[in-house]
Image (cartoon, rainbow, N blue to C red):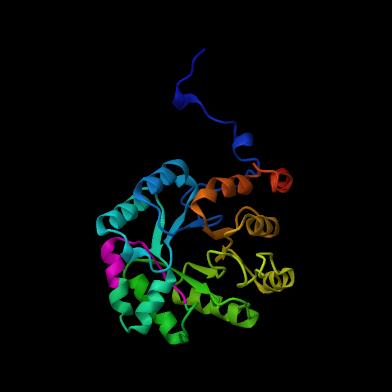
Amino acid sequence: MNRTITELKWPAHLLDPSVCRLTKPRELGQTMIIDKGLGLNAYSDLLETAANHIDMIKIGFGTAPLYPTNLLMQKIELAKENGILIYPGGTFLELAVIQNVADEFIETITSFGFTGLEVSDGTIEMDRDTRSRLIKRGIDQGLQVNTEYGKKCWGSSIEIETLLRTIEEDLEAGASLVTIEARESGTGVGIFDGNGQCKEEDLKQILSRLTNSDSLLWEAPLKDQQVKLLMELGSTVNLGNIPPQEIISLEAMRRGLRSDTLMMMQKRGNKE
């Protein structure tokens, strides 16, 4: 007997062996991709294929003003139509800060239709009062504000006490998520060494001191990094700076549909 396309569906235990993947809108297990210059056709194809698996799109670093205005606005609208938060990279705001036009920057991205703001100090120095003011300014403009902890320079590491204090103060100021810096390369920054491998002791210390990691967004552009964080924190870990072409692969790992996480997710599912 022939069945229509609308009647066809995968059995639940094959679609999500982990049995814990949440649907959008979700607060846990969020995925942020970094867009470093996708054309409109590639961008549209990406959302047609994988919008259900994408929660946030970051228009990387300061690339937003380099697009033709109508193309940028189309990308923003497509994200909004698919329930995806979209925001410029924090480096762009840092530029505005050193030029003393941060308020104008926030007003401008709001007028373009962006729905989020990233507040970071990966390249510049920013005092606590300024950071908190920018968070609150973004919220006042109706934006979801994510912040970022960590410097972008090669060899930078995480100072645990500073990280914990930053998380607490950012969330108190109204931030939704605090991003752990790893750049788009995932090497030589934060919890990753020069080869992109996780610094086991650093991660262990961070996790031992955190009372709740649900408000963290871990940048993890490389597959092995994603596997490591999924193994340590489970499929509900928030992951960012995912290359667009890797979004389906990551979703497969979240659900236990790839060998790297199949047995782990199966065990988690059996415990539910």
* Percent coordinates x, y for residue 191 in the rendering: 65, 70
Residue name at image x 29 percent, y 60 percent: 113
176 over 48 or under it: above or below = below
Q: Does the magenta stretch include residue 109?
A: yes
* Percent coordinates x, y for residue 169 in the rendering: 51, 79
250 over 163 or under it: above or below = above
Closest to the observer, 54 or 193: 193
* Percent coordinates x, y for residue 239 in the rendering: 56, 59
Residue name at image x 51 percent, y 46 percent: 23
Number of marks in the rendered image? 0
Outermost top residue: 1
Closest to the observer, 105 or 264: 105
In the picture provided, is 5 more to the left or to the right than 206?
left
In the picture provided, is 238 more to the left or to the right than 40?
right
Part of the protein shown in magenta: 107-120
Quadrant position of residue 227: bottom right
Quadrant position of residue 14: top right
In the picture provided, is 255 more to the left or to the right than 27?
right
Residue name at image x 47 percent, y 79 percent: 121
* Percent coordinates x, y for residue 28 in the rendering: 55, 56
Q: Is residue 129 magenta?
A: no
In the picture provided, is 15 more to the left or to the right than 198?
left
Closest to the observer, 195 or 44: 195
Closest to the observer, 66 or 201: 66
81 over 28 or under it: above or below = above
